[in-house]
Image (tube, rainbow, N blue to C red):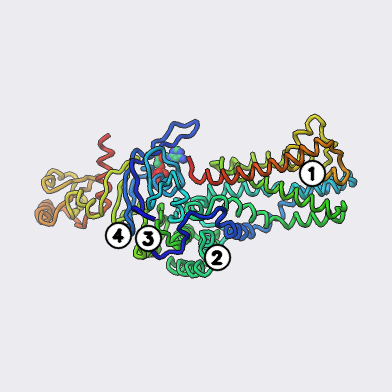
Amino acid sequence: MKTSTPLAPSRAFAGTAAFLWTEVLVQGNERMAMLTSMVVPGIILVFVEILNPALIGVALVGAILFSTFTMGQRVLNEAAYLRIDHKANDLYLAGPMTPEAYFLGMSVGIMIIYLAPTVFLGVLAVVVVPLSLGTGLLLFALAAAVWLFAASTGYIFSTFFLDNRAIWAYSSLFFNVFGVLAPVFYPLGLFPSALRPIVLLMPPSAAAALVQSVIGAATLAPWQTALAAGGLVAETVAVFVFAIYWARRTVMAD
Amino acid sequence: MSGEALRSVDLRKIYQSRGTPPVEALTGVSMEVHRGERVALLGRNGAGKTTFLKIASTLLRPTSGSVEVFGFDIARSPEKARPYIAVVPQEGKPFFHLTPREQIYTYLRARGFARETAKARTEESLERMGLNEFADRLSVTLSGGQRQRTMVATVIATEAPLLFLDEPTIGMDPFARREVWSSLRSLTQKGSTILLTTHYLDEAEVLSNRLYIVERGAVLSAGTAEELKASVGGTLKVLIPSGAVQVEQFRSFGTCVTDGLSLTVIVNPHTLGDVMEIVERSEMTATVGPVTLEEAFLRAVGRSINED
Ligand SMILES: Nc1ncnc2c1ncn2[C@@H]1O[C@H](COP(=O)(O)OP(=O)(O)OP(=O)(O)O)[C@@H](O)[C@H]1O
Ligand SMILES: [Mg+2]
């Protein structure tokens, strides 16, 4: 038979690069959307600058973490929209491309498109805070972990919806509660101490607390540092592994 | 890769969703699609066509029964069947912010085709589906039929061994439909196998080697278009616009169907003369045409509905 389709079961992650590129092309046409991703962190930064300029460094770190966290919201919206409105899952997954490639390609593609504002904030942080090389690398690693956590969570959530309109409410609730209400843009010390263990277990606020402790904006007890760091790594790995499992599991609907 | 392109045995599907009563969409479907065949599934809305296609293409879990694609059980090892298949989903849409050229090319790349192959196949598919004129316009600016052509072009370009097409020509003009037909024919000549659904019975008749009529989740009848038409009881239909009142005169010649004032009599060539003589004697008019798949479908499904 004349065909150049791979005829053995596909390698894990087969198709990731190609689908990533597809998603970059798809998202790249939404230039305004890229700018709108700056609206919330931009407004918060302006408020902080007006109300308490001393906290602008903390707020900038928060803005960077928030920007990678909300990439997960875009994955959630995009994955649900493509599945429900375009039947893209049926088109792509009934074929040799692997489900994990679909999930990861979409997530990385979205990340690349929305990366520019994050990089801009990063440059600003280096100048304003100022960040040492070590702290900068720590922030980079934490922001990457927050991204992976959020993208995985977003993809998993997306599989539960039958209608796009139902998503907006839940997704903005989730991403604003954990990305804005929790101490991401402001010091952990201003958050009720009884509730701190909870926010130390949520990746964006955990990452923020770790950077804050390094730049001297928060004091963390050793157990708190361990909780934040251990929790962040464990949750990110667990959610990512589960997202891959779930992406494979949900190709075939019940 | 071994076995039939597709074989389903006693396939059942019950949709269970919370808060709503379960829906029994397939009640035991057994069918085979041989390699190189073009097979059409016909059936009323809700008959279970999409459900069958989704299960067979590894996108929906069957409740019981089995489907094998080239010998691979789709429920037990879907990842083994997937490299061989491609799907045009019902109501699918191309990515709005890609052009048809980008859509086809990136899809082929995601399926693992090398750059050069993907490029060549993309151009071939655009040409074949008459998409060249708008190949570089974003799909969001295309008309409904142009988008659907893009979807079909995307999937046809894979030349996958087994293609599932759920209402592929919906919304297409008669020229575009013919382009799809000829593309599908040439695909099967190259060795692919095709299972499609359609509500256009003329399309089903000219395009498919065999047909299955599905009704309420079960196969009602199967065969070639000629075999299905033979079940109608004649090869010609005589349409008498004002014949309904005189239906009794015609009963002995063949099946009579009234619709308002008009009467259709299904006859064979050797009785046509007698029927036309009555028409003339009664000073009525009539038109004669061949029996089509439409009559076979209406008769098979209609009879099944009337049995309840
Ligand atoms: N997700 C679902 N949950 C519950 N019932 C469903 C679901 N999808 C389909 N059904 C039901 O299953 C039956 C078969 O639907 P299916 O989509 O297979 O029909 P179809 O033959 O493709 O119809 P059409 O010609 O309208 O496309 C219908 O009664 C439909 O309402
Ligand atoms: Mg259908």
User: Marks 2 and 4: which is nearer the front?
Assistant: 4
Q: What residue would you read off at disc 3?
A: B192
Picture layout, residue A18 above or below residue A221: below
Whether residue B185 appears in this view of the structure is: yes
Instruction: Please tell me how crowded label 3 is: few (under 14), some (14-19), or many (20+) other residues with Cα within 10 Å.
Output: many
Which chain letter goes with mark 1? A
Q: CA distance from mark 3 to mark 2?
A: 30 Å
Residue position marked by numbered label 2 in the rendering: B137
Q: Are marks 2 and 1 on the same chain?
A: no
> For numbered disc 4, what is the local secondary structure?
helix
Q: Which residue is mark 4?
A: B206
Task: Give me the C-alpha separation between circle 1 and circle 4.
Answer: 66 Å
Please tell me which of labels 3 and 4 falls first in the chain. 3
Provide residue A110's location: percent of width, then percent of height.
Answer: 65, 54
Residue type at numbered disc 3: Ser
Answer left or right for B228 relative to A190. Answer: left
